[in-house]
Amino acid sequence: MAQSVALVLVHVIFSTKNRMAFLQSPDLRSEVYAYLTATLRGLECEPVRLGGVGDHVHILAALSRKISLAELIKVLKTSSTRIVKNKGHSHFGWQNGYGAFSVSQSARDSVIAYIASQEQHHRRMTFQEEFRRLLEKHGMAFDERYVWD
């Protein structure tokens, strides 16, 4: 086969440093999402849905076959940090780690709905509770001492 094709959907989650609610402002959050969306497109990773609340983001995107997941997240975090800091939040930063979960095409719509409902979802649950549940749901072993920074 001469042509290389891939469709790898990935649900990425990362939090602000110490889960500070820097993205509480809808205007700033919208600007960060727009920037992340443009960055994804520039890296040939088609954004499907972005969402979150004041202390974390969820990104569902098709991972380009030209970039590794780790490199993608590094670029997203580094470049978006500059945008937020330029808006006057000099202490802003993202947590060091992240969560990334593969998504089948058949689960795509349910993940989109999940990301779209973040505001309602986090009226009942903290980011830490949500992240633990996702790790458990996906059968991922983790050490609580190293998940939070």
Image: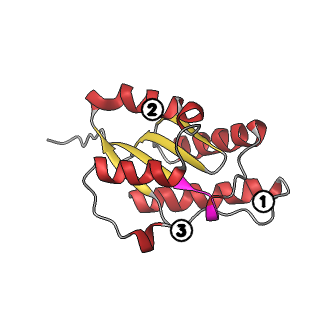
Front-most of residues 73 and 26? 26
> Where residue 96 sits: x, y (%)?
53, 68
Front-most of residues 101 and 145? 145
> Where residue 37 sits: x, y (%)?
58, 40
Badge 1 or badge 2: first in the primary sequence: 1
Q: Is mark 3 on a helix, strand or loop?
A: loop
In terms of image quadrants, where is residue 60? top left
Residue stretch in magenta = 14-18
Q: In this view, does 12 lie to the left or right of 32?
A: left
User: Of the residues shown, which amino acid type is indicated by label 1?
Assistant: Lys
What's the distance in space between the residues labelled 1 and 3, CA to CA?
17 Å
Quarter the N terminus occupies: top left
User: Which residue is tagged 3?
Assistant: 96
What residue sits 44% from the left and 29% below the top? 112
Q: Does the magenta stretch include residue 146?
A: no
Numbered circle sitting on residue 85: 1
Task: Give the number of the mark in front: 2 or 3.
Answer: 2
**Mark 3 neighbour density, 10 Å: few (under 14) some (14–19) many (20 or more):** some
What's the distance in space between the residues labelled 2 and 3, CA to CA?
24 Å
What's the distance in space between the residues labelled 1 and 2, CA to CA?
29 Å
Q: Is residue 133 above or below residue 141?
A: above
User: Which residue is tagged 2?
Assistant: 114
What residue sits 68% from the left and 44% below the top? 32
Badge 1 or badge 3: first in the primary sequence: 1
